[in-house]
Amino acid sequence: MIGSIIPDNITEFIRKTLISTGGDIKEVILIIDMINDFLHEKGTLYSERHKAIVPEMKNFLERKYKEGAVLIFCCDAHIKGDETRYPEHAIGGTWGAEIIDEFKDFLRKERVITISKRNPDAFLGTFLQTVLEFLKPSIITVTGVCTDICDKATIQGAVYRGFNNIRLITDLVATFHIPGIHDGELSHKMALEEIKNALAVELIQIHNIQV
């Protein structure tokens, strides 16, 4: 963030990551909002469509981490009153804002950090841009939920900040379905089309990933 002092945990993460990789970082994976309020049956905005991507995403992250990827969990951490468009969710410090149990083992590893956000765009009001500018990854890969909200907003944020090495894995993103209110399949497909055509971001299926 412009004019802000970089927190010690961010500085230390950047330092250790650059040392451990020798400054040669091929891929940073953004894992967006894989938290209880979206992925757990008791979560405020739970969807089976969200839950369905968890097993394959876990396998993917384990494989990519072994290959040297940096993992950045970008997670909602709202304060009361932040959101008026959706039911109250992911209040910072609560169970709903915690990363799901299936992914908590990643948090104990090096080259992994969590960035809390209060907006759909994970760059807005955070140090994500700073981290990426220091790490200089060859590829930025986007995964997580929701396709048409935080995924799309974060990709827009990346593009508008000059990052042009972005790809989205279509098998590892999803959005919710509420009959008569939010058509999950249509919203997902429309968001993918906009991400591809308006933002010129590569869409790729997991079985086609070479690096």
Image (cartoon, rainbow, N blue to C red):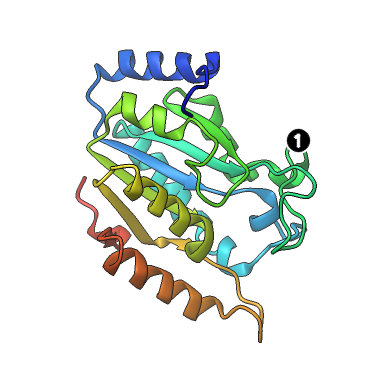
Q: Residue furthest front?
A: 3
Figure quadrant of the C terminus: top left
**Number of dots carrying numbers:** 1
> Splitting the image into 4 quarters, where does residue 47 fall?
bottom right
Q: Which residue is mark 1?
A: 93
Is the residue 186 above or below the residue 92 in the image?
below
Say what amino acid the circle numbered 1 marks: Gly
**Residue 131 left/right relative to 92:** left
Q: Nearer the viewer, residue 170 or 6?
A: 6
Looking at the rendered structure, the secondary structure element under dot 1 is: loop
Q: Nearer the viewer, residue 178 or 159?
A: 159
10 Å neighbourhood of mark 1: few (<14), some, or many (≥20)?
Answer: few
Residue 78 percent location from the top left of the image: 70, 44
Residue 164 percent location from the top left of the image: 24, 47
**Residue 77 left/right relative to 117:** right
Residue 136 percent location from the top left of the image: 27, 30
Q: Residue at x 51, y 33 (%)?
A: 106
Q: Residue at x 77, y 56 (%)?
A: 88
Is the residue 100 above or below the residue 191 in the image?
above
**Residue 117 left/right relative to 174:** right
